[in-house]
Image (tube, rainbow, N blue to C red):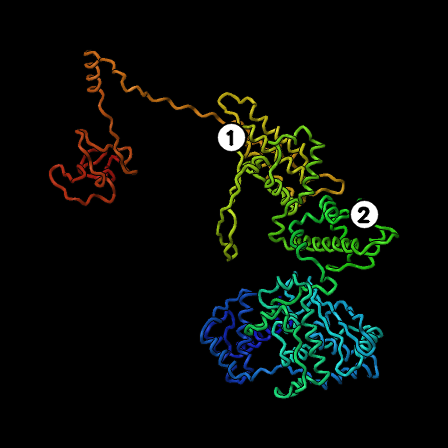
Amino acid sequence: MKSTATLVKRLGALRRFFTWCSDQKCVPLPFSDSVLYTYLDSLREQGAAPSSGRSFLEAVHFASVMFGIDGGSVTSKRVQGVAAKMAINAPPLKQALALSVDHVQALEHIAVSADTAQERCLAGSLLVLLYARCRFGDGQRASSLSLDMSAASSASLERGFLELSVRTHKTATSLQRRRRILPVVAPIFSLSGCRWHKAWLDARQALKLPVEGDMRVTCLAWLAKFGTSLAMRRILGYHVAPGASVAETYARDSLAAPLRELVRVLEAVKSGRFRPDDTRSGMLNECASPRPAEAETDSWSSESECEAEELDDSVPLLRLLPATARLICVLIFLILCAMASLVDSAASFEHRLGELGFDESVKAALAKQDLNTFAALAFASSTQPGQIDEDKFNLLVKACFGDKAVTLGVQSQLRRLIFEAITCTVQSISQRVSGGDDCKDSKMPPQERDRRLADQHERLPWLVDLQCHRAGEWTCGQICQNVVGCLSEHVPLHSCVSREDELCHEKNTSKLLTLEHNQLVLKSKDLRNSVDLSCPLHVQQAMTRRALAADQAGLITFQVLDAVTHSFLSHLSRAAPPGFARPTVHSLVRADQELWKLVADEAASKIHKDATGGKPLDAMFKRLATEPAVLFHLLPTPAAVPEPKPNTNRRQRKRPRSASSDAHSEDTKRCKPKKHFTKMPKQLQGLLPKNKKGEALCFNYNLPHGCKEQVKGHPPKCGRGLHQCMRCGRTHGQHECPNKD
């Protein structure tokens, strides 16, 4: 996604090129090497900007990619050489300068003592962005503001932080990154001792103006001069090291230690021990106190001592949660977020309440408020991800326990349960939006599976008690993946093994090295047991197990699939017409595959229950089971004609033949001459290939092109035959014969 400024820049470079081509009376499109080289050389001779050559080549590449214009000449070495020669004359890069201490103190005085509220608000906004180390655009797009003051603050010494929530920023290039909030934190600190933050908040409240300004480089430059580690400066600049995004995500609040380091540097500037405006030899005062040991034992020391590496702007510090979410348990996050369906399982929620030690009164109180799942509890106690609303939490405690006193232990357990619910819900939503591998491997929670299995025992006690009808874990998992992914994919019958066979199957411990997404992956070999489909009984059991698994997942009613099973099996026992054979087990398997294919094409993603509780797939299976495309596979087929058995008796004696029969056979052979057919050209078909004496005639001689071989004797004869007419026998070709017509 490109900004409008980039688009204007590219089109401006192309417009200047088209104008030059019009003046020189040459064809601009398609791009040619000679025209591009002449144009760049003219720019160099005219003294154009050093970057104009490189900008023009970028515009040509942009046009070739976006508009499909041939831009192969950009790769020409001499064209790139002219642009590089122009870039050599570019002046040195001039970077933005950091503000001096006097400038910052002057801003603080203006923010407090300015005559108008507009001036105080503007100066305060500049100070917020200066201490927060953010850009002008970050300040413009700040969506919320929160004030975190320390309980030990006083009128003379105030400690705390101002936190801005920024959704759209420089590195938010994708929709997924724009959904993540970037926390921009500024310490409440004053080099001059003025309470500028209070004056700024009062001015904002009076004028209702957004935050403005861009002083990002000042504090970062002070930190570098003070000797702060690269890892801390990178985090304070809202970036993370390459490959460290996962660790920063689970750290929850990696800004805590760097912000303490920033406050320590600002205190050194205020006290005069550190003078960032002086030269290198005079920055640190001789009476400067030694650096506290606490800052040395930082979790980032292992990275700060390594060599400086290139800053990766493509990995911003977006996933760090605010300070109110520091206590989220990472272990609970890893254990409970493995299943997307966990947040909607009432059985899993009740099981977790028992593990945390809640009595029946608390369970009944939560159920009375319809809080019987993790998702319901998460949205009832939180207004934004990662945080617990204290007002809603107090209402929840009052609803569960009434007016009686609640111990801190019970409150901590309830907070822990809410944290788990929020974490699982956020992870479930993320899986549904991204559709990653975690969503593909979703399975039903154990407690929810046991509850649904018990419900099946009550509805179908005569069927579920049989061990051969208990579906295996893999079959249930495949059906659950269809439910989570809104699919109706076919589950093959040969993979619908029973739970008993699955337990008896030897566990596979061998590994397989594969290449996936340009990475080597070590995974277990897929050696699942398969069902023997050689007889109708095994096929019926496999279809019954699949129907029970689909009923357990809430996808299809068991009675519907069971009726389809009996309908298919009835074709196997139906009498076939004479000369035809009954359908086989393989015919039934093909009909089953065709039925699921038709259902998948018609259902698409509409597989869940409707508002009335009906299952859409039930009606589809009932109707499509009688489709001609399905019944075609169950029709009788023509019976195969058996081949005659060869005589395998080698000792069988030949019947003796009499002398009269032998004489009769010899006479018959003499009377019946052998028939011999000669292949002739198409133009000579219907004529005699031999004369009356039985001598062969030359085909080429009787064709228009004639015979070119040597002729001898009389009548003339070549190696192919006599040169005589096939019609009258004279010495001319049949195409010249007077009897032709």
Question: Where on the picture, by quarter, is residue 712?
Answer: top left
SS for callout 1? loop
Q: Is residue 65 above or below residue 22?
A: above
Checking the image for residue 534, the label placed there is 1
SS for callout 2? helix
Question: Where on the picture, by quarter, is residue 614?
Answer: top right
Q: Position of residue 292 (x, y in %)?
A: 67, 76
Total marks in image: 2
Q: Amino acid at mark 1?
A: Ser
Q: Is residue 724 above or below residue 95?
A: above
Q: Amino acid at mark 2?
A: Val
Nearer to the camera, 406 or 127: 406
Front label number (1 vs 2): 2
Q: Is residue 510 above or below residue 639?
A: below
Q: Position of residue 62 (x, y in %)?
A: 56, 69
Nearer to the camera, 461 or 33: 461
Residue under label 2, please give it: 362
- Position of 108 compared to 469: left or right? right
Residue at 64% across / 64% down in the picture? 248
Q: Position of residue 684 (x, y in %)?
A: 27, 36
Q: Is residue 306 above or below residue 326?
A: below
Q: Earlier in the sequence, mark 1 or mark 2?
A: 2
Residue 601 appears anywhere in the view: no
State the CA–CA distance, disc 1 to disc 2: 55 Å
Placement of the N terminus among the 4 image quadrants: bottom right
Residue at 72% across / 86% down in the picture? 102
Checking the image for residue 164, the label placed there is none
